[in-house]
Image: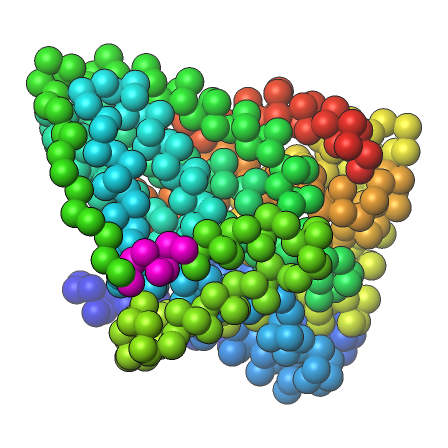
Amino acid sequence: MNIRDDASILLLAAGALCVVGMITLTGADEPLLRVAIVGGLAIFCFATRIFPELVTTLLCFLAFLMLDLAPPEVIFSGFASGGIWLMISGLIIGTSITQTGLGKQIAARIFARTGSSYTRTVVLLSTSGLLLGLLVPSTIPRIIVMMPVAVSLAKEMGMPTGSRGQIGLAIAAATSTLLPTYSILTANLPTIVHYGALETLLGIKASYADYFIAQFPANLVRFAIILACLLPFASGSKPGQMSDNSGPVDPMTRTQKHLLGLLFLAIAFWATDSLHGISPAWIAMAVATIVLVPQLKMLKSDAMKTSVDMTPVFFLAGVFGVSAVAQHVGLDTLVADNLVPSLGLSPDSSLHNIYAIAGFSTLISHLTTAPAAPVVLVPLASAMAEAANLPVLTVAMAQIIGIATPFLPYQAPPLLVAMALAPIPVPTLTRVCLVLAIGVAIIGIPLSWAWWGLIGIM
């Protein structure tokens, strides 16, 4: 049986699943049940990717419309949220960084002086992955930039493919580019989804600066553990075979300098949004608009047709649509009434509350993957906040800690991309993820709890 036959069987199975789902729907008279079935099928398809995200999203929209489960303005409300425009702008900005060569320039300048020290290389690689989270508001473009750099560095330092040292550098690039950057509101899809859902469903707008202040303790722990886990890989790095990779770096072009200046200006506005009150999404949109001006040559004239993949935008709109319709029919209240009490939330035990909310969020993110978890979690935030006597924003911050804590690599799609770009053994990456998760549970959550009490959001 060839690949085409396998694909046909998969498509046939997927079609059968949809037929069964629609038959079930026609027999379900309760709007709550219908929304639960459509939403459940959508989350299943998003998590398993049995269909492309665009197909799943459009099927979900069609099902909601055909079954008259909510007005169109509710079903398509995601397109009006700041999160969706933050995603669109991030895709445009990320593409411009790649097309202008700015990403490679930044990496080359950071790594020009790593020398023959494995420890220094891991620290610089990890720090660079973290700092790129400020410049590139999308994880997968950062992974695409960082992984080839890590592989090239390993070769320059005399480490063959599959060696312990090479694996350590690759995992350092992958994990540091994703996990510690959860302290940056605009850096990752799950935080953008969460931000957009909070605004769409609860009317809560998260400040870039306040978000960073709340999230940095747990992510500081993540970064420290990444270094602690990966520095010992130096024992397999064959230091005697390393060469000095410090060499001249090509000067930046005028276009690259202009784009870098624009990014720094955007970062300055993002970091001070608590002062000026401009939404991170609108700042990103302003940058994307400038980037699209043809005369500035930051993007090719046909980039929107050939290079900017808008599929994630529809995925995000689908996630927001499921949440909005679930709230419209009261499904979120029904689930909250039956599920939240089982977490044992209590006004008298704030540390237990944070552990329960973060732990539940980690579980949900593994059942749905991180980008889809907010569709389940955000509608429950108000009920959790009421049960725990906490501000809704504090509950949302605890949910983010849970979403950002993968036990298994599949929970975070960027880690899957990293494994596709570099020879990273799944068992090794899984062990690193487990150590990181344990570290967050033992150190990160109590540290965040104490910090939140100090800054007054508990």
Q: Is 328 above or below relative to 406?
A: below
Q: Main secondary structure of the magenta part?
A: helix
Residue under the image location 76 percent in, 52 percent down: 380
The percent position of residue 324, horizontal first and vertical second, equals 71, 69
Residue 89 located left or right of residue 11: right
Depth check, front residue: 106 or 200:
106
Image mark count: 0
Residue under the image location 90 percent in, 33 percent down: 347
The stretch drawn in magenta includes residue 256? yes
The percent position of residue 99, horizontal first and vertical second, equals 26, 63
Residue 114 located left or right of residue 187: left
The stretch drawn in magenta includes residue 75? no
Examine the rendering and report whether any part of residue 244 can be seen: yes
Give the quarter of the image for residue 162.
Answer: top left
What span is in magenta? Answer: 255-261
Q: Is 376 above or below relative to 245?
A: below
Depth check, front residue: 109 or 317:
109
Examine the rendering and report whether any part of residue 190 can be seen: no
The percent position of residue 122, horizontal first and vertical second, equals 31, 25
